[in-house]
């Protein structure tokens, strides 16, 4: 995959934008060091819950902006989201299966930035991504045409992580339990 992101830098402010969204560009070690420091301070469960909500909201927002920016709709937006995540160095994301009408999906992640930046660390290291996929799935369903069958609200979890000895990470999206 050749990362061909359109990056524009405002000469007056130094603000970077991609697809009309302001961006930050930081080294992976910087982000991971900050991530693990907050994880240690708050505990994984508390931090994961905070990240889930923030990631969900951010993915939903991103999908809405990108759909308008590129004239995309439905699962094409979800696929574009994963492409952009992959181009930005988080890892290589692919949709292994997806059925928005039932709010189900399986996302595979190869070469996770969290696994690569923490060699030898074991466990589910990539939980930060979970809310992103539920937010993207719910955006797909919330914006489906009235004639399309809309799936129920969704939830996502990291089902397995490469840091547990697997070949790659897997995230599962399913209907939100009521």
Image (cartoon, grey):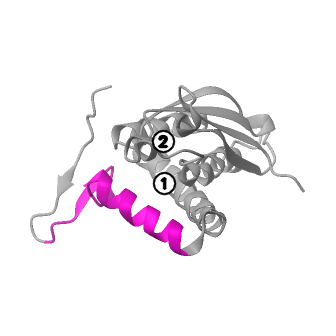
Label 1: few (<14), some or many (≥20) within 10 Å?
some
Instruction: Identify the residue at horizontal 61%, vertical 49% (top origin).
Output: 130
Residue 30 placed where, x, y %? 30, 60
> Disc 2 versus disc 1: distance between alpha carbons?
8 Å
Instruction: Identify the residue at horizontal 26%, vertical 54% (top origin).
Output: 27
In front here: 46 or 104?
Answer: 46
Instruction: Identify the residue at horizontal 48%, vertical 41% (top origin).
Output: 81
Closer to the chain start, of discs 2 and 1, is 1
Going by the picture, which residue comes out furthest to the right? 178
174, above or below 53, in the image: above
In front here: 1 or 69?
Answer: 1
Q: Within the magenta stretch, is there residue 105?
A: no
54, above or below 134, in the image: below
The kind of secondary structure element at disc 2 is helix
Q: Within the magenta stretch, is there residue 28?
A: yes
Residue 51 placed where, x, y %? 57, 63
- Res. 110 in view: yes
Range of magenta residues = 13-41
Residue 19 placed where, x, y %? 33, 49
Quadrant housing the N terminus: top left
The kind of secondary structure element at disc 1 is helix
Label 2: few (<14), some or many (≥20) within 10 Å?
many
- Res. 23 in view: no
Asked whether disc 2 touches disc 1, contact meaning CB atoms under 8 Å apart, the reply is yes
4, above or below 88, in the image: above
Residue 81 tag number: 2
In front here: 122 or 54?
Answer: 122
Residue designated by label 1: 62
């Amino acid at each position: 995959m050749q990362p061909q992101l359109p990056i524009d830098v405002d000469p007056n402010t130094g603000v970077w934008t991609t697809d009309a969204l302001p961006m930050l560009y930081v080294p992976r070690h910087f982000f991971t060091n900050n991530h693990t420091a907050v994880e240690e301070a708050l505990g994984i469960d508390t931090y994961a819950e905070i990240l889930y909500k923030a990631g969900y909201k951010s993915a939903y927002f991103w999908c809405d902006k990108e759909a308008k920016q590129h004239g995309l709709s439905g699962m094409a937006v979800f696929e574009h989201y994963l492409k952009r995540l992959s181009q930005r160095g988080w890892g290589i994301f692919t949709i292994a299966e997806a059925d928005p009408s039932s709010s189900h999906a399986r996302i595979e992640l190869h070469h996770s930035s969290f696994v690569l930046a923490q060699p030898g660390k074991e466990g589910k290291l990539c939980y930060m991504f979970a809310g992103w996929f539920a937010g993207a799935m719910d955006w797909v369903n919330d914006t489906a045409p009235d004639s399309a069958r809309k799936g129920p609200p969704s939830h996502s979890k990291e089902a397995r992580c490469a840091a547990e000895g697997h070949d790659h990470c897997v995230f599962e999206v399913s209907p939100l339990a009521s």
